[in-house]
Amino acid sequence: MATQPIGDRLVSVEEYLTTGYDPDCEYDDGLIVERNLGEFEHSFLQILLGTLFTINMDNWGVFGLTEQRVQIKPRRFLVPDVCVLRLGLPREKILTRPPLIAIEIMSPEDTIRRVSAKAIEYLDFGVEYVWVIDPGARVVYSGTKSGLQLVPSGELSVPGTPILVRIGELFEKLDRI
């Protein structure tokens, strides 16, 4: 599935928010943008991460949401594969406040350039941590303002919290199936 605008007309924010897309799409200043997803490795890692944050919700003080719309600008909505929010924040139908972590899982059609640009958008919005997982290459990146940085240890953490995700363990579960 290509990450590109679909349709040949501009759509209002209101129309985007009241239309069901299957799978959900992103929105960029009037354009509906398809997301790359729907493949086995992508899906399985997404559910593993969602489960990991759910199981550790009380200990880590956070919870995860999958495919949650995030409004990063008045006319820009992104849909991270997984976003992680601190417990105790007001609940929103569409997130308008930055989550603590945005996680993108790459599909074969994704490029480092595209996910790097998306990571910068998240960071500019105020997301503190952006993690990009490439199941094909079995690597993980951390988003920075200058782009993606490989995390050679494969361990993702949030300083000052007990949050620790060992991507190698998730890949091991993926490989057992």
Image (cartoon, rainbow, N blue to C red):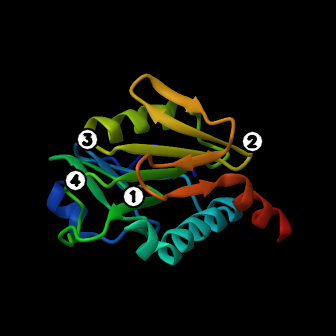
Three-letter code, disc 4: Val
Horizontal side, residue 91 vs residue 140: left or right: left
Reading the image, the residue beneath label 4 is 11
- Where does residue 147 sit, x and y in percent of width and height? 47, 26
Three-letter code, disc 1: Cys
Three-letter code, disc 2: Ala
For this rendering, which residue is in front, 31 or 68? Answer: 68
For this rendering, which residue is in front, 18 or 123? Answer: 123
Alpha-carbon distance for marks 4 and 3? 23 Å
Reading the image, the residue beneath label 3 is 125
Alpha-carbon distance for marks 2 and 1? 25 Å
For discs 2 and 1, the disc positioned in front in the rendered view:
2
Horizontal side, residue 72 vs residue 108: left or right: left
Residue drawn at x 66%, y 61% is 39
At numbered mark 4, what does the secondary structure look like: helix, strand or loop?
A: loop
- Where does residue 17 sit, x and y in percent of width and height? 22, 65
Please rate how many residues cluster around mark 2, counting C-alpha atoms within 10 Å: few if below 14, some from 14 to 19, many from 20: few
Q: What label does residue 156 carry, if any? A: none
- Which of the 4 quarters of the picture holds residue 83? bottom left
For discs 1 and 3, the disc positioned in front in the rendered view:
3
Please rate how many residues cluster around mark 4, counting C-alpha atoms within 10 Å: few if below 14, some from 14 to 19, many from 20: some
Residue drawn at x 70%, y 61% is 170
| Mark 2 or 3, nearer chain start | 3
Q: Is residue 102 visible?
A: yes
User: On the rendered image, what quadrant is the C terminus found in?
Assistant: bottom right
Alpha-carbon distance for marks 2 and 3? 28 Å
Mark 3 and mark 1 in contact (Cβ < 8 Å)? no
Reading the image, the residue beneath label 1 is 25
At numbered mark 3, what does the secondary structure look like: helix, strand or loop?
A: helix
For this rendering, which residue is in front, 129 or 45? Answer: 129
At numbered mark 1, what does the secondary structure look like: helix, strand or loop?
A: loop
